[in-house]
Amino acid sequence: MSSLEYKDLAPLFDFPRKRILQSMDVYHCPHAVFYNQRDERCITCHQGEECLWMNRNDALIALEEKPIDELKQQLLIAVDYIDANLTPHHLSRRDCDCDNCHWRNRVQQALNKDINTLKP
Ligand SMILES: [Zn+2]
């Protein structure tokens, strides 16, 4: 059993949702950012990963019905994404106070609560 609860993780999804949507080119998407696995345009889309993340973790999706482990996994994917898209304002990770780092720290703290349950 994880010591983490849905309420620890759910609020952390707001920031990457906003960031990923902002960065996506929604205008040219034929499906309004609803991933369609039968459409070749979706499979070859350069925004495929962001789009899949959004479709798994959208605000409309009942995250509370998903296993905590999956929520953790999806948050870590979001961390990678945010990391890869840091703004020029982000200087050094140690002292940085940008929104990205702020959010990263919150994710880190939440996941650290769970450290006792990690397998060796
Ligand atoms: Zn930063």
Image: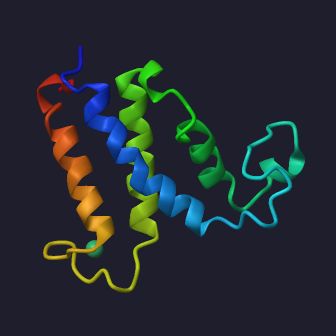
User: Which residue is located at x 34 percent, y 46 percent?
Assistant: 12
The total of numbered circles placed on residues is: 0
Vertical order, 69 against 90 (above or below): above
The answer to whether residue 72 is above or below residue 28 is: above
Q: Whole-percent x and y of residue 61?
A: 56, 32
Kindly identify the residue that appears in the image at 33 percent across and 85 percent down: 89
Quadrant of picture, ligand 1: bottom left
Is 25 placed left or right of 12 in the picture?
Answer: right
Residue extending furthest toward the front: 60
**Coloration of the structure image:** rainbow
On the picture, is 90 further left or further right than 18?
left
In front: 50, or 30? 30
In this rendering, is residue 83 above or below 72?
A: below
The picture quadrant where one finds residue 87 is bottom left
**Where does the C terminus fall, quadrant-wise?**
top left
Residue 114 as seen in the image, left or right of residue 71: left
Residue 64: % across, % down: 42, 23
Query: In the figure, 81 relative to 36: above or below?
Result: below
| Quadrant of the drawing holding the N terminus | top left
Q: Residue furthest top?
A: 1
Q: Residue at x 16, y 46 (%)?
A: 109
Residue located 41% across and 46% down the image:
13
In front: 67, or 22? 22
Would residue 80 be found to the left or right of residue 9 on screen? Answer: right
Pick the front one: 23 or 117: 23
Q: Position of residue 114 (x, y in %)?
A: 17, 31
